[in-house]
Image (tube, coloured by chain):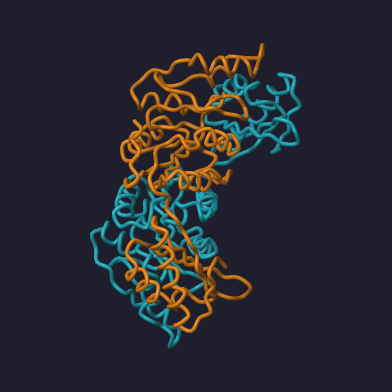
Chain colours: A orange, B cyan
Amino acid sequence: MTPATDPDRVYTAALLIIGDEILSGRTQDANLAYLAKWLGVQGIRLKEVRVVADDHAAIGDAVNALRNAYDYLFTTGGIGPTHDDITVDAIAAALGVDVIVHPAARAILEKYYGDKLTDARLRMARVPDGAELIENPRTGAPGIRYGNVFIMAGVPAITQGMLAALDGQLPGGKPVLSRTVAAWTAESAVAATLGAVEKANPGTQIGSYPFWREGRTGANFVIRATDPALLSACAAALLTALTDAGLDPVDGEL
Amino acid sequence: MTPATDPDRVYTAALLIIGDEILSGRTQDANLAYLAKWLGVQGIRLKEVRVVADDHAAIGDAVNALRNAYDYLFTTGGIGPTHDDITVDAIAAALGVDVIVHPAARAILEKYYGDKLTDARLRMARVPDGAELIENPRTGAPGIRYGNVFIMAGVPAITQGMLAALDGQLPGGKPVLSRTVAAWTAESAVAATLGAVEKANPGTQIGSYPFWREGRTGANFVIRATDPALLSACAAALLTALTDAGLDPVDGEL
C-alpha cells in the first residue's frame, strides 16, 4: 500500500512496459521518459524499467518482483478491448484475486458508448477485485489502481491524461534537482576533473554525456542533488575546474 | 556460451539498458527499437528489456538474471572513460572474474589516441578477464563479448556500428515475419473479428494498435508468423472478415 509521506525518505518507483510492439521495434516507447519526468516532480525516483511481451507469466512475474521491490509500480499497455489485451487478467492472477466488472467503470463506459457498449468494450471495465479507478479524461476507459500498482494505457496521450489525474496525489520525498554544465571537449580529456569535483562535493552526482556535432566533440555534465545549495556549489566548482583545465565551459546545456 | 544453430529452435535475447540519464527522462533511449529490428533480421527474438541505474548491484543482479534466462544478453551504456562508467566492473563482478586491460584493446586505443592515451582513456581497454572485443568502427574504443553477454556503448551511433560488426555472426532461427492490415475503425468495434481470425489461423498472432488522427479513429492490425504462407493466409482472412464487417480495410499500414 502507499507509504506515508516523509520528506527525508527516498520514494522509489518502477515501470513495467507491456507489449510485443515495443519488443519488436515497431513502436518507439514514449511513456518511459514522460513518466520519469512526472515522477521527478512528485519527488519519486524511477529506479527500474522492464519491458515484457504480451505473455501472462512474463507479466505476472515482473509485476510481483517490482511491486515488492519499490514503493510504486506503474504499468503501461494491454488494457484495451481486443484479444491481445491481457494485462488485467495477468495482474489479477499475480495478485491472487479475481477479475470483476467494476460498477463505476461500467457506468463510465455506458455514458461514453451509449447503446454501442458491446462485450468487447465492456472488457475495459474489468479490474482486479478490490481495485480503484484512475480517471481517463481522453477516451473514457479508466486506468486502474490496486494498492501500489497503477495500471495505465499504452497510448501516450491517454497515459499522460491518467498521470495528470494523479498529480500531487502520491506521497513523495525531495525531488532530485539537476543542473547542466557543458564544454566542447572529449569527456575523456576531463575525466579526472569530473571525478575529483564529484568526490569533493558529497551529496552530488555528476553524469557525463558525450556528443558529436558540427564536426566537433562535446559533453554535457549533468549534476544531480536534492539540496539546491549543494547543487549550486558543485556547479560552481565544476565551472571553475573546467576553466582551470583550459576550457571555456558553458553554464547550461550544449 | 553461444548455442549451436538450429532452424527450428527459437533463439531469445534480452537487453539491459544502463544509465541514470534514461531513468531520469533526460535522454530518450534509441537503442531498444534499433536492436529489436536488428535481432529480428538475425532470427533472434527480443523477449525482455530492463533499464537500471548506474549502480553496481543493480547492474550485476540484472546481468546474472538475464544472461541465464535468455540465449543472448546485450547491454548498452556505461563503458566510457569517466567515473560514472561502471558497467565493466559491475559485470566482471557479476561474472566472478577480474578486470584486466585487454592487449588488443590497448593497441586500438594507442593507435586512435597516439601520445594522448591518458589513464582515463585507457579505462576503455578494461574488460572482464576472458572477454573478446567487438569492433567499434566509429570511435575506436571496442565493445566487449563475454560468452553470451555483449557489452555495448550507450551512444546509438556507436552501438549501431558495433551491431554492424556482429551482423550474421550469431546463430539464430527463423525470423518472425510481419504484415499489417488497417482500417478506419475503433478497434473495439472489430475486437471479436480479430480474435476469431487469430483463432482460425494457428501459428499466427494479431496485435491491434489503435490511433487517433485527422479527427478520426483507426487501428493497425499487425500479423506475425514465422511461416510466410500462414502469414499470407491470415492477412487474406482478416481483410475478408473486415470487409464482411462493413469496413474498407487497407492491405498495409495506416
The residue positioned 37% from the left and 51% from the top of the image is: B3
- From what the image shows, is residue B169 above or below residue A162? below
- From what the image shows, is residue A61 above or below residue B7? above
Q: Nearer the viewer, residue A9 or A22?
A: A9
Residue lying farthest bottom? B115
Q: Position of residue A96 (x, y in %)?
A: 33, 22
Residue lying farthest top? A115
The residue positioned 28% from the left and 62% from the top of the image is: B92
Q: Which of A237 and B115 is in front in this view?
A: A237
Q: Which of A216 and B174 is in front in this view?
A: A216
**Numbered circles on residues, count:** 0
Asked if residue A214 lies left or right of residue A179, the reply is: right
- From what the image shows, is residue B21 above or below residue A87? below
Q: Quadrant of residue B194?
A: top right
Q: Where is residue A183 in the image (x, y as percent from the top left)?
A: 52, 74
Residue lying farthest front? A229
Asked if residue B141 lies left or right of residue B217, the reply is: left
- In the rendered image, the quadrant that contains the N terminus of chain B is bottom left
Q: Position of residue A115 (x, y in %)?
A: 66, 11
- In the rendered image, the quadrant that contains the C terminus of chain B is top right
Q: Where is residue B219 in the image (x, y as percent from the top left)?
A: 66, 32
- From what the image shows, is residue A248 above or below residue B3? below
